[in-house]
Amino acid sequence: MSVGPRLQASRLSDRLAALLAEQVQAGSLAPGDRLPTEQQLAELHGVSRTVVREAVHQLKSQGLLISRQGSGVYVAPPATNKPLAFDPEVLESVQAVAQIVEVRRALEGEIAALAAERGNAKQVTAIRRAEKALEAAVTAGRDGVDEDLALHRAIAEASGNPQFGRLLGFLEQYLREAMRVTRGNEARHQGFAAAVREEHHAIVEAIAARDAATARRAASNHMVQAARRLEMAGVLTTPAAAKDKQK
C-alpha cells in the first residue's frame, strides 16, 4: 500500500476529515466507493485508529459518509442540501478571530435591527436580564463568554426569525474560543472592558427603544471596535491592516 500524506498538526481528526472530504469533492473517492478500513487509513496517514474513527464520525455527521451494517463505510450519494461547515482552522488560528468578527458584523447588525422592530416586551426584558448577567459575570472576575453568547442569543430570539438563532447556535463552536481571546485581551487592557459594556448597552437600549437603524449601527460598531481592540493590543492584524503595512 502506498503511503499517504502524513498529518503532523494538533487537531489530527479535523485534518484527516478535511483531507478525506477533499478527496470526495475531487472525485478520487466517488459515491458508492468503500473506504479503506480503520487500520488501513491509520497506516496510510500515520495516525491512530482513534483519530480515524473521529474523522469518519465527522464526515458521517456531515452526510459525506454512510455505514452499511457488516460491510463497511462508504461515500454517500450526493446530498441535495449540503450541511453548513467551516474550515477547522478557524478553531486553531488566532488570526481567524478577525474572520469570525467579520462574519458576526455582517449578521448581528441585521439581527439587532430586526429585534428592535419585532421584539416584544417579554423578549426585551430577557435581553436586559442577559445584559445584567454578563455584567455580573465580569464583575465576579469570570470571562463572561457564556453570558455574552446568551445575550446575543436573546437578541436573535427577539428578531422573530428562528434561523438566526440556529445560525448563531452553529457559530458558537467557532465563536467561543474567539471570544475567549477577545475577553482575555479586554481584561488585560484598561478601558477595553468599559468600552465593551457601553457598546452592549447601546445595542440593548436601541432595541428597547425600537430604533432599528440605531440598533443596526450599534451592533455593527461593536464588531468593528472588537477588531480594533485586538489590533491595538497586538493580538492580531486584520486583512485591511496587513495591506496597509505592505504599502
Image (cartoon, rainbow, N blue to C red):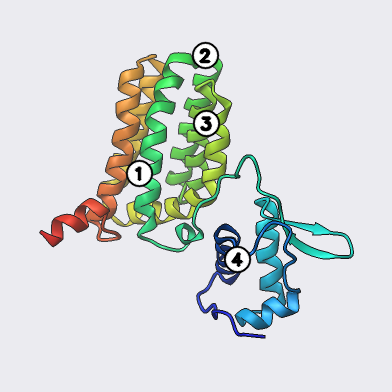
Mark earlier in primary sequence (4, 2): 4
Q: Looking at the picture, how far across and down is residue 112, in whole percent?
A: 41, 26
* On screen, residue 81 above or below 64: above
In the figure, is residue 238 to the left or right of 109? left
Reading the image, the residue beneath label 1 is 102
Assign the N terminus to one quadrant of the image.
Answer: bottom right
Please give the residue where the numbered disc 2 appears in the rendered image.
Answer: 121
Residue 198, visible in the rendered structure = no
Which residue is painted at 54% across and 23% down in the image?
161
Amino acid under disc 4: Ser
Q: Work out whether residue 108 or residue 125 is closer to the camera in this orientation and state it.
A: 108
Real-space Cα distance between discs 4 and 1?
34 Å
Q: Residues within 10 Å of mark 2 (few under 14, many from 20)?
A: few
CA gap between label 2 and label 3 equals 20 Å
Confirm whether residue 2 shows in the render: yes
* Residue found 49% across the figure and 20% down from its top: 124
Q: Which mark is residue 164?
A: 3
Examine the rendered structure and indicate whether residue 238 appears above or below residue 36: above
* Tags 2 and 1 touching, CB below 8 Å: no
Mark in front: 2 vs 1: 1
Q: Earlier in the sequence, mark 4 or mark 1?
A: 4
- In the rendered image, the vertical position of residue 164 relative to residue 237, given as above or below: above
